[in-house]
Amino acid sequence: MSQKIVVVYGAASMGQELVQAVATAGCEVILIDHSEEKLKKGIERVDSVLDREIARWGLTVGEKRAIMSRIKSSTDIKDAAKAWLVIETLKETLEVKRQLFKELDAICPPEITLASNSATISITEIAAECKNPERTIAMHFQPPIAKVPLVEISRGLKTSEATFDIAVRFAKMMNKTVVSVYDCPGFITTRIVLPMINQAVKVLEEGIASCEQIDNAMKLGFGLNAGPLTLADKIGIDTVVFYLENLYKETFDQSYLPAKLLKKLVRADFKGIKSARGFYRYGVDGLRISDSGLKTEQLSQASAK
């Protein structure tokens, strides 16, 4: 175990963002995934994001070189034992996360902290089959991780005070403000923002206003950095649906029943920025194309696919 190494498990978008943020904070980080292809794409994505920061004068070439030098990748889960902290960023599926934590618990010495970035699943449930549940904790980072100064930390029923202190220390090292919540799926942010997105989609679906008008109203009226439909595209519309369904199963709260249009868009492969099409269209650079908001006549096209 090294006090300098952090392991991020999962090379999808959240894993990529977390790896970048951890390396930028000065830690060595190993990105682990079972797929060599995902690892390659993940590292390439981090590289391109840093290049865009250089183009905006937010980073120097030397700083980028230093950040990339701290990032390694591996397909061997046993490399998790080299770290002092492991953070998983897998899909929001209890069985998948629980199995991974069970494997990590068997591989990693008891002093290594195991954290989940889960947004909608209880850490107590995820760690249910671990022999050392006291070293497990939930750390929910908000995308874009490099820019959002927040991490929500949730202790499981058996999480130790020492584990909580380690999580807080790590968050502060990354210059994040810590908000501590009870062991509850959805934390604060996810439980509040999802109904807002869901209602915004229903307003669009009913033809009350366009995508741009809905987003502008919410941004200007409430001081948001991004409107709810833009936010859905950033999160991933398929991920939004998954989160809503998970929270509905947990709470039976009708506000978490996904709007019909959300499911139509997922079936049409309109998943947001990652598919270059969601409530808006996006270029290869991930930037939104002007005047590209989903039009009323396109809604039937989305449902027909």
Image (cartoon, rainbow, N blue to C red):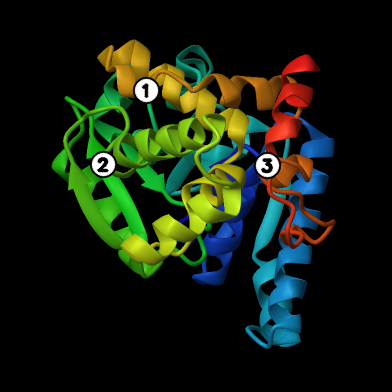
Q: Is residue 232 left or right of residue 62?
A: left
Q: Amino acid at mark 1?
A: Tyr
Q: Find numbered disc 1 in the image and state the secondary structure of the residue it sits on.
A: helix
Q: CA distance from mark 1 to mark 3?
A: 20 Å
**Which of the two residues, 29 or 266, is positioned nearer the viewer here?**
266
Tag 3: Cα neighbours inside 10 Å, few (<14), some, or many (≥20)?
Answer: many
Q: Amino acid at mark 3?
A: Gly
Q: Position of residue 162 (x, y in %)?
A: 19, 46
Q: How many marks?
A: 3
Disc 2 to disc 3, C-alpha distance: 23 Å
Q: Residue at x 47, y 47 (%)?
A: 228
| Badge number at residue 133 | none
Say whether disc 1 or disc 3 marks the residue closer to the N-terminus.
1
Mark 1: few/some/many CA within 10 Å (<14, 14-19, 20+): many
Q: Amino acid at mark 2?
A: Ile
**Residue 90 seen in the figure:** no
Quarter containing the C terminus: top right
Q: Which residue is mark 3?
A: 272
Q: Is residue 70 shown above or below 215?
A: below
Residue annotated with mark 2: 188
Tell me which label, 2 or 1, sits earlier in the chain.
2
